[in-house]
Amino acid sequence: MVALLVFLAFSGLSQAIGNDGADGKFERRDSFHFVIFQDVDLDEASGLRGSRHFEQQLLATLEGAFDLLDSLLRIRPDRKIEVFVWDPEIFDTRFEGLFRFPAAGFYGGAIHIRGDVKLTERLVRVLHHELVHAAFDAAAPRMILPAWMNEGVAEWFEARAVGHRRLSAGQREALLRAMKHGALFSLADLSMASFGGLSPDAAGLAYLQSHAFIDYLVETHGERDLVQFSSDVIRKGSLERAARRAYRMDLDALEVNFIRSLGLL
C-alpha cells in the first residue's frame, strides 16, 4: 500500500536497482503498458510452475487492470509503468521498517510488490491497488493527494477487481464498532500524506474508513460522479471545488452524510 513518504524516499529506487535486483536474479519482461522485474525464486524457468509462466500471468493481470482502470476511472497512464516483484524474504529484509504494519506492496516511482510463487488472489489485489497509485502519480506527478482519496480509491478499485461491489458484513461491523467507541477518524485526520506511520490497528481502520467513504460516494452518487471528482482533482488541484462540482455539496457535508449512513448499515 502506498505512502507518499515512501514515494519521496524511494523515487529513485528503480533507477538505482536497474535490472540486477537485490540478489542479481531480476528477470525483465515487457508488455504494452508495463515493464516487470521479477525476483521471485522459482525452481523452473518454463512450464506451469516456471518463471516465464508466472511473468506472463503477471503481465496479463496488469494489462487487464490497466483496462479496468480506464473503464472505471477513465485514467490511462501515458508511460510504461515499472513493476518490481520481489522475492518475499528479500522484500521483508530490504523494506523492513518502512511501515509500522505488514505491507504487501507500495508505490515509490515504481510499483514494488512482495511476490509469490504463483498468482494468488492476494497478489492480484495488491497489483490492482498499487496501479491506482501509479496512475494518480502519472496523471499528476507533483500533486500530494490526501491519503483518504489515494488509498480509498485504491481500496475500492482493488475490491472491484475481485468482484466485491460492496463492503462485506465484517467490514461494516468494524466501522459500526469504531463509531460506537468514538474511534472513527475525521476526514481531516485522514488527509495526511500517508498512513505508513500509523500503528497496525489505526492503519487498518484508516484504510477501511477511506474505502468506505469512496464506496459511499459511489453507492449514493454513482461511478460517473467519482470519475468526475477524481478528474477535477487531478486537473485543477482543488478537492473542495471538485466535490461541489461532482456532488453538489462540499466535503464537510459529504462527511456528515457518510457518518449518518453508517447507522443504517
Image (cartoon, grey):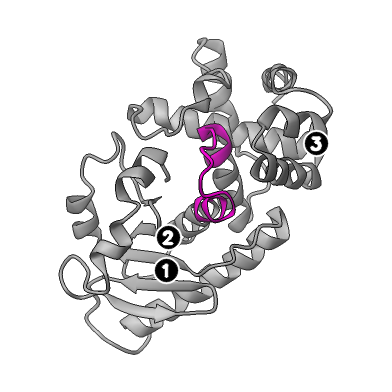
Q: Are marks 3 and 1 in contact (CB under 8 Å)?
A: no
Spatial CA span between label 3 and label 1:
37 Å
Q: Work out which quarter of the rendered image holds the C terminus and state it.
A: top right
Residue at point 32% right, 81% down? Answer: 51
Describe the element under mark 3 as helix, strand or loop. helix
Q: Quadrant of residue 21?
A: bottom left
Would you say the magenta stretch is mainly helix, strand or loop? helix
In the rendered image, residue 33, in percent from the top left (x then y), is placed at 54, 73
Q: Is residue 86 visible?
A: no
Contact (Cβ within 8 Å) of mark 1 with mark 2: yes
Q: Residue at 67% across / 22% down in the picture?
A: 262
Residue behind mark 2: 123
Crowding at dot 3, Cα within 10 Å, few <14 / some 14-19 / many 20+, comes out as many
Q: Which residue matches tag 3?
A: 246
Question: In terms of sequence position, does the residue under pointer 3 or pointer 1 come before the other?
Answer: 1
Residue denoted by label 1: 119
Task: Give the x, y percent position of residue 57.
Answer: 46, 76
Q: Amino acid at mark 3?
A: Ala
Q: In the rendered structure, which segment of residues is drawn in magenta? A: 133-150
